Amino acid sequence: MELSSLLSRFNEPETLKMAKLGRELRAKGVDITDLSLGEPDFDTPDHIKEAAKKAIDDNFSHYTPVPGYLDLRQAVCEKLLRDNGLLYQPEQIVVSTGAKQSIANTVLAIVDAGDEVIIPTPYWVTYSEIVKLAGGKPVLVKTSFENDYKITSSELESTITERTKLFMFSSPCNPTGSVYTKNELENLAVVFEKYPNIFIMSDEIYEYINYVGKHDSIAQFDAIKERVIVINGLSKGYAMTGWRVGYIAAPVLIAKACEKIQGQFTSATNSIAQRAAITALLSDLKPTREMVAAFKYRREKVMQLVREIPHIICNEPSGAFYIFPDVKFYFGKKTPSGIVLNNADELCMYLLNDAHVSTVTGSAFGEPDCIRLSFANSIENITKGMGKLKAALLNLS
């Protein structure tokens, strides 16, 4: 019996794979320190949980409109105007089961077989795989450490061809934590003005986890706004990963297309989560600010610790909760058992199985010289994990 050839087009996310392997070792009694975790280690704020409880008591237990409750979509519009100065109408909003589904809907609505999709590297693991699933061709543009892993306007323009259909990027970026400035985004927008057939997908899920100031969206530039699809959600900024609420803000043409696709896959997002999301979006952001302050303190600690490891170079993230150190110095080194570590994949498995630290290989993000470490963890666990990682690297010969 044969399964669909679709399965051969894309890979399992490396982030989920490492989380699974870590859980398996932990179940066997191994003391795993998780520096791969891609979610806030904070609980959802109480006022949001209370809104969900009230929604249950108020019997919000029935099917909802595919793109989400109207008042939730209005709340998204209020948030976008309040925080980003972006004017949208509810018919331009589609609420999905997490930002990942929002991204999948967007790609499936835009990309045909053979279309090219430009993705600056490093990038979030799922971008390229969803493009492959849609039959498109990911065109990966390698960015540089010296430019904080951000694509320049000249790099962008030199990659555009007549088959380019979509550009996908994130700011703040997972895995590097890089944040595009308004000027950098404007330079990209100037390029896109010349190519009116290219859509732009701007993943802004880490919007609030920003250590350098105001978040800027590429959708602010009127000349290209009608081709920009803003991806966002509640997982990171509100510590609501398990609630699975994401959304797009897009031209009506794209929003209706995503609604049509979603109607065949999942229909609408969980009704209770939607009611809680309204409260989250319209309430005071004090819990978010407190969480970000904790992340900023942890960032300082993890940067201090990574600088103490010889032969590693690492940019300081301006957002998100990851560092993305270059570890290629350790490629070709031998473990105490005599095994040669040829690349980041093998280095990460060594760190997991020998040092009992869970990380994620940079090859999953399109940058094979690096590994991703998360500081969405306690100071105690960050210190412990970085200590084990440093000892394991220094034990190579």
Image: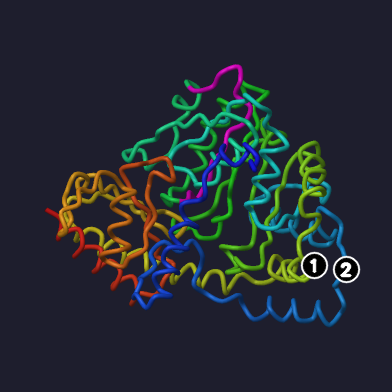
**Magenta segment includes 163:** yes
Q: Is residue 143 above or below residue 214?
A: above
Residue 185 within the segment the image draws in magenta? no
Tag 1: Cα neighbours inside 10 Å, few (<14), some, or many (≥20)?
A: many
Which residue is most to the left?
Answer: 397
Judging depth in this view, the residue of 286 and 276 nearest the camera is 276
* Residues at discs 2 and 1 in contact (Cβ within 8 Å): yes
Give the number of the disc on residue 85: none
Would residue 299 be found to the left or right of residue 127 on screen?
A: left
Q: Residue furthest front?
A: 1
The local secondary structure at tag 1 comes to helix
Going 26% across and 66% down the picture, which residue do you hit? 355
Q: Amino acid at mark 1?
A: Ser
Q: CA distance from mark 2 to mark 1?
A: 7 Å
- Mark nearer the N terminus (2 vs 1): 2
Which residue position is annotated with label 2?
A: 62
Residue assigned mark 1? 271
**Dot 2: element:** loop
Q: What range is drawn magenta here? A: 159-174
Q: Name the image quarter holding residue 2.
A: top right
Residue 129 sits above or below residue 65 on the image? above
Residue 220 location (% of width, % of height): 64, 41
Asked if residue 102 lies left or right of residue 119, the reply is: right
* Snapshot quadrant of residue 390: bottom left
Of residue 254 and residue 342, the one placed in the foreground of this image is: 342
Q: Which residue does the image show at 62% across and 21% down from the upper left?
A: 195
Residue in view at x 16 percent, y 55 percent: 310
Which of the 4 quarters of the picture holds residue 134? top right
Front in this rendered view, residue 244 or 295: 244
